[in-house]
């Protein structure tokens, strides 16, 4: 059974940082591309970052490029998203994704 469990969300002021984590199980994590998505209030869920097998290919949505960093630890089957210089527009529920499987999401709120 595939499980994706996100953690690390919270409330921060603009300019702050957070590190999201996603614990994966039930599928061959090591060989698969993993993604982070987010859904802001009143908006559709959007893709923001992906990382392929062994981190060979990494891509970011334009608005987070240079501020967010996606990494993975294949020994622990963990996916991470380091978010720096957060902005109010980053407020959203953040989701870990593999294929058509999703975690429950973790809330990130950026507000002064």
Image (tube, grey):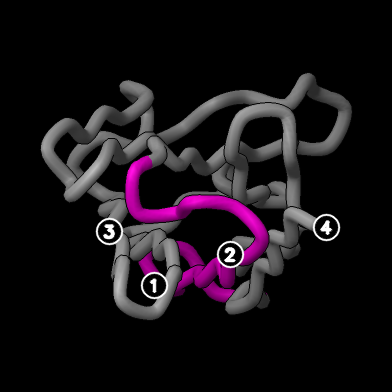
> CA separation, marks 2 and 4?
12 Å
Toward the right, the furthest residue is: 42
Residue displayed at 42% across by 57% down: 86
> CA separation, marks 3 and 2?
13 Å
- Measured as percent of width and height from the top left, residue 32 is found at 40, 39
Q: Which residue is mark 1?
A: 17
Classify 10 Å Cα crowding around label 2: few (below 14), some (14-19), many (20 and above). many
Which residue is at the front of the view, 35 or 25?
25
- Measured as percent of width and height from the top left, residue 98 is found at 58, 39
Marks 4/1 in contact by CB < 8 Å: the verdict is no
Q: Which residue is mark 4?
A: 104
Q: Which residue is mark 2?
A: 24
Whether residue 33 appears in magenta in the rendering, the answer is no
Marks 2/4 in contact by CB < 8 Å: the verdict is no
Toward the left, the furthest residue is: 56
User: What's drawn in magenta, residue-wise?
Assistant: 11-31
> CA separation, marks 2 and 1?
23 Å
Marks 3/1 in contact by CB < 8 Å: the verdict is no
> CA separation, marks 3 and 1?
16 Å
Which of the two discs, 2 and 1, sits closer to the camera? 2
Q: Decide which of tag 2 and tag 1 comes sooner along the chain.
A: 1
Q: Decide which of tag 3 and tag 1 comes sooner along the chain.
A: 1
Q: Secondary structure at mark 2?
A: strand
Left or right: residue 90 versus residue 14 is: right
Q: Which residue is mark 3?
A: 71
Q: Decide which of tag 3 and tag 2 comes sooner along the chain.
A: 2
């Amino acid at each position: 059974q595939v499980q994706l469990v996100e953690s690390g969300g919270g409330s921060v002021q603009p300019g702050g940082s957070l590190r999201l984590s996603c614990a994966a199980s039930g599928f061959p994590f090591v060989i698969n591309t993993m993604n982070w998505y987010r859904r802001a209030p009143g908006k559709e869920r959007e893709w923001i970052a992906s990382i392929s097998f062994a981190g060979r290919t990494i891509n970011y949505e334009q608005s987070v490029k240079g501020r967010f960093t996606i990494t993975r630890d294949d020994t622990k089957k963990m996916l991470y998203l380091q978010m720096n210089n957060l902005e109010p527009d980053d407020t959203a529920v953040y989701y870990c994704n593999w294929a058509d499987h999703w975690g429950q999401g973790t809330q990130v709120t950026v507000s002064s």
